[in-house]
Amino acid sequence: MLVCVCNRISDRDIRSAIHEGASGFRDVKSELGVGNCCGQCVPFAKGVVDDTLSQLQLSRGFQLAQELKA
Ligand code: FES
């Protein structure tokens, strides 16, 4: 889904940036340019960032728990 119309940035682009090391909206904005024109996409883009970070933290927590069990 297109999140930032001005810069043609999708939710997939944002999720990829997070998985490649971006640690928050500021990093994603700097890396992709999301939200740097009209700004209409910023609230939704921040939501995608937060959701992706939460999923990543859950996944890492699950992996750590599995490693501790082994
Ligand atoms: S829609 Fe993202 S800056 Fe305009």
Image (spheres, rainbow, N blue to C red):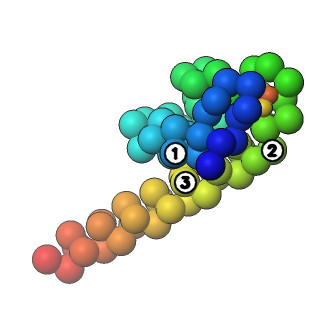
**Residue 8's spot in the image, x, y percent?**
64, 30
Tag 3's secondary structure?
Answer: helix
Q: Quadrant of residue 52?
A: bottom right
Q: Quadrant of residue 2?
A: top right
Question: Which residue is depicted at the point 71% across and 51% down?
Answer: 47
Question: Which mark is in front, 1 or 2?
Answer: 1
Which residue matches tag 3? Answer: 52
Give whichever of discs 1 and 2 has the lower sequence position: 1
Which residue matches tag 2? Answer: 43
Left of 57 or right of it: where is 38? right
Question: Which residue is depicted at the point 85% across and 35% down?
Answer: 40
Q: CA distance from mark 1 to mark 2?
A: 16 Å
Frontmost residue, 67 versus 11: 11
Pointer 1 with pointer 2, Cβ within 8 A? no
Question: Which residue is depicted at the point 21% across and 70% down?
Answer: 67
Q: Quadrant of the C terminus?
A: bottom left
Q: Quadrant of ligand 1?
A: top right
